[in-house]
Image (cartoon, helix red, strand yellow):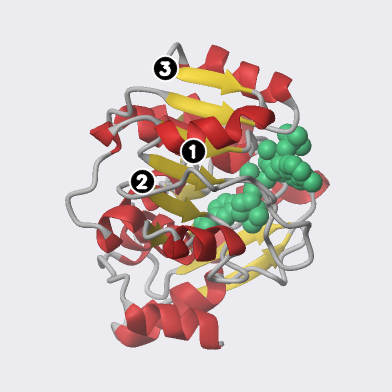
Amino acid sequence: MIRPSIPLAGVIGDPISHSLSPRLHGHWLRRYGLKGHYVPLHITHANLAEALRILPDMGFVGVNITIPHKEYVLDLASTVTDRAALIGAANTLTFLGDGRIQADNTDGQGFLANIRQRLPGWTASAGPALVLGSGGAAKAIISALISDGAPQVFVANRTRARAEGLKEQFGARVEPQDWTRIPDLVERSALIVNTTSLGMTGQPPLAIDLSRLSPPTVVTDIVYAPLETELLQAASAAGCETVDGLGMLLHQAVPGFERWFGYTPLVDDELRQAVLGG
Ligand SMILES: NC(=O)c1ccc[n+]([C@@H]2O[C@H](COP(=O)([O-])OP(=O)(O)OC[C@H]3O[C@@H](n4cnc5c(N)ncnc54)[C@H](OP(=O)(O)O)[C@@H]3O)[C@@H](O)[C@H]2O)c1
């Protein structure tokens, strides 16, 4: 990639004002004294193709992609990494300097890196995983769990047909389950992940029976507002290790920053405070 003297990057979404990514990348740029800027870009579906065509000429080296464009950008990319193709969505685009656009999906990598930072040596091969939800985030996480060796991935979703679709997409290790079976699955799983929006501020609670939850099951929530969800509180009370969802957001940003600004940034408490504190 030919790097402009002041490289620009950003995050594209509709809406975009809620995104924490400008704060995150801005902190890294300041902390490492790097030249560059990272900006929020409010771009609608109708304008997306044109925006991606002109951004490289304006000095942009890449962009993150968020709701609702993560699937559609695959049609606009010149090359798509294997993991983005498998998931069917991208969150990181890199402008290769010759008009080509590379699309990647780093959500699954961010998910695994977050757990490993909190629990060094953790691996998905430890036992079955229970994934609650079947949306875009669930796809990235299931793909990562399988590639990391999870022997079984139970998927419980309000709309069971979506969970069935994930079995078709990711293979026999994915086992769609009824929501009503969660109490039993909780007992059988080495990892429990909430990928639904339930439990998020302003959303209904994630009301599931956790009475059979016990160590060594690890519990993680990708909702990060609030940081300690009711699920994580209940898991801590049961003596289980918990991992909050903010780290996934921070870790998924690392590959893009590396590619665009040429420096491998750290995910640490200073970054967490900068992102949370505003
Ligand atoms: N930490 C991170 O880095 C990170 C990354 C990505 C996303 N997230 C968060 O993860 C959450 C999901 O994101 P997404 O992109 O996967 O969204 P999505 O594609 O819209 O999927 C939403 C999921 O939540 C379920 N759901 C929603 N409302 C529900 C309800 N009232 N009862 C039961 N299930 C319900 C949906 O079930 P149905 O299929 O039945 O509709 C679906 O499985 C969001 O809160 C998002 O902010 C965090």
Amino acid type, residue under disc 1 in the picture: Val
Q: Is the C-beta of the residue carrying label 3 under 8 Å from the nearest atom of ligand 1? A: no
Disc ID at residue 217: 2
SS assignment at label 3: loop
Mark in the foreground, 2 or 3 = 2
Residue 164 at what x, y percent from top left?
A: 63, 17
SS assignment at label 1: helix
Instruction: Report, in whole angstroms, how far the alpha carbon at label 3 lies from the one at label 1.
Output: 17 Å
Instruction: Report, in whole angstroms, how far the alpha carbon at label 1 lies from the one at label 2.
Output: 9 Å
Labelled pair 3, 1 in contact (Cβ < 8 Å): no
Residue 183 at what x, y percent from top left?
A: 57, 36
Which residue is under mark 1? 186
Q: How many residues crowd around disc 1 within 10 Å: few (fewer than 14), some, or many (20 or more)?
A: many
Disc ID at residue 173: 3
**Could you tell me which residue is drawn at 41 percent across and 46 percent down?**
96
Disc ID at residue 272: none
**Could you tell me which residue is drawn at 48 percent across and 20 percent down?**
174
Outermost residue to the front: 211
Can you tell which quarter of the image residue 264 is in? bottom left
Q: Is residue 187 above or below residue 271?
A: above
Can you tell which quarter of the image residue 133 is in? top right
Amino acid type, residue under disc 2 in the picture: Thr
Labelled pair 1, 2 in contact (Cβ < 8 Å): yes
Can you tell which quarter of the image residue 256 is in? bottom left
Viewer-closest of 130 and 169: 130
